[in-house]
Amino acid sequence: MRTVYVAENLIDAHLVKHALEAESIPAFVRGEALTGGIGELGVFGLVGVMVPDLAVPEAREIIARLHLGTPAQAGVSAEGGLPGALPA
């Protein structure tokens, strides 16, 4: 098994896991039980999604199509503020 995605949180990891499983790729969330140890453990890289070695190339393609890490731009106007918001 190899890690194909390092998640920021459990929800993110499970979204990736379910997307991979929907394409018939078995996936495992690594570090799920470690999130309760924040403060005792390092903060980054605890949670990841792992797949079998043979499925790594296909899994990476699927993850790339998910467009993860792209900031949401919905609801932001061309001026950079929220629609209908007045300056303070």
Image (cartoon, grey):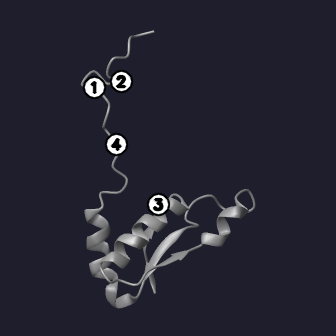
Q: In the rendered image, which residue does mark 3 sit on?
A: 12
Residues under labels 4 and 2: Cα distance?
Answer: 13 Å
Picture quarter containing residue 72?
top left
Please indicate whether residue 80 sits to the left or right of residue 34 in the image.
left
Residues under labels 4 and 1: Cα distance?
Answer: 12 Å
Tell which circle, 3 or 1, labels the residue nearer the N-terminal end: 3
* Farthest-out residue, bottom: 54
Tell which circle, 4 or 1, labels the residue nearer the N-terminal end: 4
For the residue labelled by badge 1, is the local secondary structure a helix, a strand or a loop?
A: loop
At 55% from the left and 67% from the top, the residue drawn is 47
Tell which circle, 3 or 2, labels the residue nearer the N-terminal end: 3
Residue contact between numbered discs 2 and 1, judged by CB atoms under 8 Å: yes
- Asked if residue 9 can be seen in this view, the reply is yes
Residue 77: mark in rendering: 1
Picture quarter containing residue 60?
bottom left
Residue 72: mark in rendering: 4
Residue type, label 1: Ser
Residue contact between numbered discs 4 and 1, judged by CB atoms under 8 Å: no
Tell which circle, 2 or 1, labels the residue nearer the N-terminal end: 1
Residue contact between numbered discs 4 and 2, judged by CB atoms under 8 Å: no
Residues under labels 3 and 2: Cα distance?
Answer: 26 Å
At 35% from the left and 57% from the top, the residue drawn is 68
Residue type, label 2: Leu
Measuring from the top left, give residue 51's x and y in whole percent: 42, 82
Tell which circle, 4 or 3, labels the residue nearer the N-terminal end: 3
Q: In the rendered image, which residue does mark 2 sit on?
A: 82
Residues under labels 4 and 3: Cα distance?
Answer: 15 Å
Quadrant location of the C terminus in the rendered image? top left
Residue contact between numbered discs 3 and 2, judged by CB atoms under 8 Å: no
